[in-house]
Image (cartoon, grey):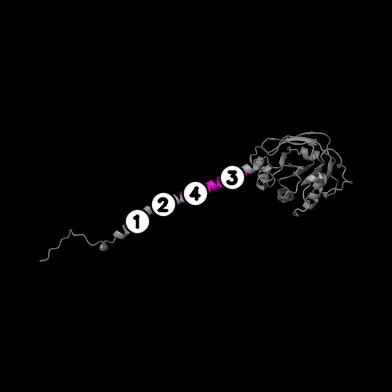
């Protein structure tokens, strides 16, 4: 008679759940490792983003228009104007004016005291003691939107002589028009010169005889108008104009990228 002992264990090979249990345990042990790797990657990505943001802010914090625009608390501001308004831009003229036909040439620009996007003071002062290039921009103007990156590239490549001061005036601001607010536009383009905000009535633009956008007013070191321009200007022309008002030692190279 055969005695069958039912209490004996079957060989492990015969256990259909043995290998599955081992696989489950192995996968369970891998979960903390995978989670750890993912967390480490997220930390690295966050650190890179933080350092990049910090670097950008640091670079822009040197008083650049873009840095100030990033901290914008306003898009227009009051302006105080003193002096004599410039005559209207010659009717029908475009590009840079001919000095012999522009009645503003030789006239001292009005002094304008205003603010930038963060409330800091910006002044257009004829008594600044250096040549100045004043650029009037409107956020909704397609030509301005195309010219700003070209002008910034020109500035980045050393096109503006170091003794020529460049100031932009954000004017004709309208929340109902495209590309609003101008602060985000200026910050996005990395615009480095100071930006003055015009008031809601575009008083500064009117005082300077603005005909359209963009609008350029170039002065000598005594604050007298040397040349004005409106619309899209070839960089070569603008370069020649600013070089003409800069002392020879401070003049920028004439070879600059074409717009």
Left or right of 55 in this view: 132? right
239 versus 82 height, above or below: below
Query: Quick one: label 1 or label 4, which is nearer the N terminus?
Result: 1
Q: Which residue is found at the position 80% from the left and 38% from the top? A: 207
- The residue positioned 41% from the left and 52% from the top of the image is 33
**What residue is disc 1 on?**
24
Q: CA distance from mark 3 to mark 2?
A: 30 Å
> Percent x, y for residue 236?
79, 52
Give the spatial CA distance, label 4 vs label 2: 14 Å
Please identify, in this view, whether the residue under mark 1 or under mark 4 is nearer the observer.
4
CB of mark 3 within 8 Å of CB of mark 4?
Answer: no
The percent position of residue 103, horizontal first and vertical second, equals 88, 42
Q: Report, in whole angstroms, how far the alpha carbon at label 3 lies from the one at label 1.
A: 43 Å
Total marks placed? 4
Q: Main secondary structure of the magenta part?
A: helix
Residue hosting label 2: 33
Q: Are marks 2 and 1 in contact (CB under 8 Å)?
A: no
Name the residue tied to disc 3.
53
Residue that badge 4 annotates: 42
Instruction: Where is residue 5? Give x, y as percent.
Output: 15, 61
Give the magenta-colored segment's residue range: 39-56
Q: Look at the image and say whether residue 107 sits in the magenta stretch.
A: no
Say what secondary structure mark 3 lies in.
helix
> Which residue does the image show at 32% across and 57% down from the upper left?
22
Cβ–Cβ under 8 Å for marks 4 and 2: no
């Amino acid at each position: 008679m055969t005695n069958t002992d039912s209490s004996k264990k079957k060989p492990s090979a015969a256990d259909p759940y043995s290998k599955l249990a081992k696989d489950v345990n192995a996968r369970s042990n891998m979960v903390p490792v995978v989670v750890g790797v993912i967390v480490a990657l997220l930390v690295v990505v966050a650190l890179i983003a933080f350092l990049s943001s910090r670097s950008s802010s640091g670079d822009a914090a040197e008083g650049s228009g873009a840095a100030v625009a990033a901290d914008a608390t306003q898009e227009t501001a009051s302006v105080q104007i003193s002096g004599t308004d410039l005559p209207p831009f010659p009717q029908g003229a475009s590009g840079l004016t001919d000095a012999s036909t522009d009645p503003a040439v030789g006239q001292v620009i009005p002094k304008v005291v205003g603010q930038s996007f963060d409330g800091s003071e910006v002044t257009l002062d004829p008594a600044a003691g250096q040549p100045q290039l004043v650029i009037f921009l409107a956020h909704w103007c397609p030509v301005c939107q195309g010219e700003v990156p070209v002008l910034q590239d020109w500035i980045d490549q050393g096109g503006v002589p170091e003794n020529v001061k460049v100031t932009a005036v954000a004017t004709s601001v309208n929340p109902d028009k495209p590309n609003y607010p101008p602060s985000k536009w200026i910050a996005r383009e990395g615009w480095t010169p100071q930006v003055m905000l015009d008031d809601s009535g575009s008083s500064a633009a009117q005082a300077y005889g603005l005909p359209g956008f963009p609008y350029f007013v170039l002065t000598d070191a005594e604050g007298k108008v040397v040349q004005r321009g409106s619309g899209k200007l070839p960089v070569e022309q603008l370069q020649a104009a600013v070089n003409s008002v800069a002392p020879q030692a401070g003049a920028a190279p004439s070879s600059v990228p074409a717009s």
